[in-house]
Image (cartoon, coloured by chain):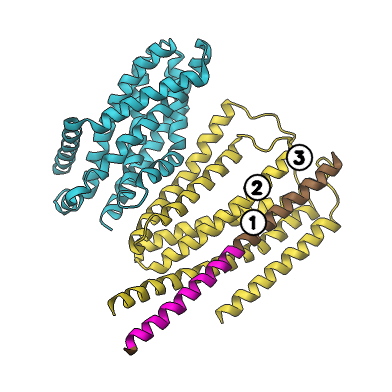
Chain colours: A cyan, B yellow, C brown
């Protein structure tokens, strides 16, 4: 139980820190809205077409906006040697990782919660016909993105060109997760039931399980050595 | 001793390649369906085999580094990955040129090609990451973790893109058909030749890594004196 | 079509060789550079130790 208390402490700390300044959150929101705007110039869609690429569009928006949040995950601990201090505490490194990943997920979910209605308005799409399955898919997809993203954020915290390396590595690794999330989102926004795309759901869950296990196993190696 | 081994392997490899080239260009007939363009296969297919072996070796080397913390394993990891990327590039370029004639297009987003490109991106990302880290132990540790993530991602990427493609079928391609007899033998004859060349490259690169380590320690000595 | 076919075959085979030779050359160039650096540092260390 202590493990989960540690995780919760880190989660609460990160959320509190972010909500105090809301830097990453504001940047992420603005960036997401800007991309939605730019996409409208790039495509000028009819309703039929939009429904077809809605999944792809939305997850690209989430991926780009998410990197802004993920970049800060471990970077915020760099000033004043906070990272070293955190590693010196009794909190196990995997709990530290888990807490940060959960905090990032909460923040990214907040951004996504705004993006969906805005997307519905801008592109004139009724997106909530399969609301609960869609929520499940969004949570699973965001978790996959956050887990891999937080891991790579830890990997790149101490290196040059961190802001460039993180997206470069993250997007390539995330391809399977993003494909499944996109496929499921397109399916659900079109109003089809989840049972029609179960293969992708199983795939997304598998992706999440594999990468969460890998990340938890390797956190200590990455942070401590 | 080491230099002799390298020279012998290089000479043998080049001799084999030249002998095979003679067979490929002069002795084998044109393919009934494709014409002479199929001869590119003799480099294209063995390159992928060689790259695959090199990547497996580099994963093993990375894991060994994390266990033993000996920088020589890190040297092996980067040497094999760099050579693998060279052979991956050969695979992609030769495949594209072949495709231009056999299929009429330079590129298509079918499962195999897309996965190949993702693989190339993943490992180029590994090499770029290494240039961003100056401290040798940190560089070895971080890149070893990335190698594990990249290798774990490969089968997942392959499956996800394969499923994606069965839903969105690729353009109808005039198939390559099967190869038989003396042609098949030539493919398998070129493979050891490319493996020998690859092994020579790895050994040269390995030596460069150990020289770099000596340079590092000499620099520190100069600084201290 | 037939002449294009042979032409592209040569491009394909040539590209494989170019990449192999190109990589080999970069290795050799790098080798020379770090051997020079090594020699320079070794003589520097000897000089400093002699003083």
> With C41 as the anchor, is B98 left or right in this view?
right
* Callout 1 touching callout 2 (CB < 8 Å): yes
Query: Seen in the image, is B7 located left or right of residue A203?
Result: right
Query: Which residue is tagged 3?
Result: B101
User: Is A184 situated left or right of B33 in this image?
Assistant: left
Please rate how many residues cluster around mark 3, counting C-alpha atoms within 10 Å: few if below 14, some from 14 to 19, many from 20. Answer: many
Please, which residue is most extreme toward the front here?
A: C51
Q: What residue appears at the point 52 percent right and 42 percent down from the top-left corner?
A: B118
Which residue is at the front of the view, A129 or B72?
B72
- Disc 2 sits on a residue from what chain? B
Q: Quadrant of residue B140?
A: bottom left
Label for residue B93? 2
Q: Nearer the viewer, residue A201 or A50?
A: A50
- Tell me the CA gap for discs 1 and 2: 9 Å
Q: Of tags 1 and 3, which is closer to the observer?
A: 1
Marks 1 and 3, how far apart in space?
A: 21 Å
Give, as a single range, the part of the protein colored magenta.
C25-49
User: Are marks 1 and 3 in one subunit?
Assistant: no
Q: Position of residue A207 (x, y in %)?
A: 41, 37
- Judge the density around disc 2: few (<14), some (14-19), many (≥20) Cα neighbours within 10 Å: some
Q: Is residue B91 above or below residue B176?
A: below
Q: Residue at x 50, y 10 (%)?
A: A47
Between A11 and B204, which is closer to the camera in this rendering?
Answer: B204
- Residue B132, percent across and down? 39, 54
Residue indicated by mark 1: C19
Q: Main secondary structure of the magenta part?
A: helix
């Amino acid at each position: 139980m202590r493990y989960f208390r540690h995780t919760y402490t880190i989660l609460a700390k990160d959320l509190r820190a972010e909500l105090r300044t809301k830097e990453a959150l504001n940047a992420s929101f603005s960036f997401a809205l800007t991309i939605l705007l730019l996409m409208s110039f790039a495509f000028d869609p009819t309703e039929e077409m939009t429904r077809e690429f809605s999944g792809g569009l939305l997850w690209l928006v989430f991926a780009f906006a998410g990197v802004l949040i993920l970049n800060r995950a471990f970077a915020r601990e760099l000033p004043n040697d906070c990272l070293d201090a955190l590693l010196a505490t009794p909190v196990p490194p995997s709990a530290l990782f888990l807490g940060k990943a959960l905090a990032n997920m909460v923040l990214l979910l907040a951004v996504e919660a705004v993006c969906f209605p805005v997307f519905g308005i801008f592109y004139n799409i009724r997106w909530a016909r399969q609301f609960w399955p869609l929520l499940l898919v969004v949570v699973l997809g965001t978790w996959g993105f956050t887990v891999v993203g937080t891991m790579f954020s830890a990997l790149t915290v101490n290196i040059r060109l961190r802001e460039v390396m993180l997206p470069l590595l993250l997007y390539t690794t995330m391809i399977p997760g993003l494909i499944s999330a996109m496929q499921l989102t397109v399916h659900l926004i079109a109003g089809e039931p989840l049972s029609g795309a179960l293969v992708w759901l199983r795939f997304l869950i598998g992706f999440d399980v594999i990468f969460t296990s890998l990340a938890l196993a390797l956190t200590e190696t990455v942070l401590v050595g | 001793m080491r230099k002799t081994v390298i020279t012998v392997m290089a000479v043998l490899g080049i001799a084999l390649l030249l002998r095979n080239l003679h067979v490929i260009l002069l002795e084998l007939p044109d393919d009934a369906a494709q014409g002479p363009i199929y001869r590119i296969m003799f480099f294209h297919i063995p390159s992928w085999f060689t790259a695959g072996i090199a990547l497996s070796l580099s994963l093993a080397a990375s894991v060994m580094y994390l266990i033993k913390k000996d920088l020589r394993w890190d040297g092996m990891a980067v040497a094999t990955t760099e050579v693998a990327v060279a052979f991956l590039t050969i695979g992609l370029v030769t495949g594209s040129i072949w495709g231009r004639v056999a299929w009429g297009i330079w590129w298509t987003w079918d499962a195999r090609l897309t996965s190949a490109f993702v693989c190339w991106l993943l490992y180029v990302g590994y090499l770029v990451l290494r240039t961003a880290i100056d401290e040798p132990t940190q560089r070895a540790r971080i890149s070893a973790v990335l190698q594990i993530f990249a290798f774990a991602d490969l089968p997942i990427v392959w499956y996800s893109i394969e499923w994606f493609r069965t839903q969105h079928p690729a353009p109808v391609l005039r198939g390559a058909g099967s190869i038989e007899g003396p042609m098949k033998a030539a493919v398998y004859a070129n493979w050891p030749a490319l493996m020998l060349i690859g092994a020579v490259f790895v050994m040269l690169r390995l030596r460069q890594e150990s020289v770099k380590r000596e340079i590092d320690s000499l620099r520190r000595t100069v600084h201290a004196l | 079509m037939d002449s294009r076919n042979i032409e592209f075959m040569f491009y394909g085979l040539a590209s494989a060789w170019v990449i192999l030779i190109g990589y080999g050359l970069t290795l050799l160039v790098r080798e020379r550079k770090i051997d020079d650096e090594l020699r320079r540092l070794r003589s520097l260390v000897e000089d400093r130790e002699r003083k």
